[in-house]
Image (cartoon, grey):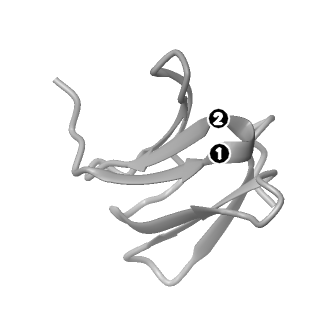
Amino acid sequence: KENFDGSLVYLAAAQSISSRAADTTVGLWDADELVCVRTFSRCTHPVLGLNFSYDGQMLVTASEDPHVNLTFVDTGDVV
């Protein structure tokens, strides 16, 4: 069973969906196939918000800690 709280962001240009979960992870989903293609777990607290950058190349996440994480969607590398 997945620990999922229903928070989603859709990026039409890339056919991608990003989701946040109560267990501090963020998932990147293929919108056509409905499969998780990558999981990001760099947050130490539950993720409160997420969004794609304007060009869709980065995923921005904010958690209960005082940090904002910027992650490249293609590689998973953190800025």
* Marker disc for residue 15: 2
Q: Are marks 2 and 1 in contact (CB under 8 Å)?
A: yes
Local crowd size for mark 1, using a 10 Å CA cut-off: few (<14), some (14–19), many (≥20): few
Query: Is 33 on the left or on the right of 13, as rendered?
Result: left
Q: CA distance from mark 2 to mark 1?
A: 5 Å
Nearest the viewer among 21 and 30 is 30
Quadrant of the rendered image containing residue 34: top left
Q: Position of residue 67 (x, y in %)?
A: 57, 78
Query: Is 64 on the left or on the right of 66, as rendered?
Result: left
Give the residue drawn at x 52%, y 15%: 33
Count of marks overlaid on the render: 2
Q: Is residue 71 above or below residue 45?
A: above
Q: Where, quadrant-wise, is the C terminus in this rendering?
A: bottom right
Q: Mark 1 sits on what residue?
A: 12
Give the residue drawn at x 53%, y 29%: 31
Give the residue drawn at x 81%, y 51%: 57
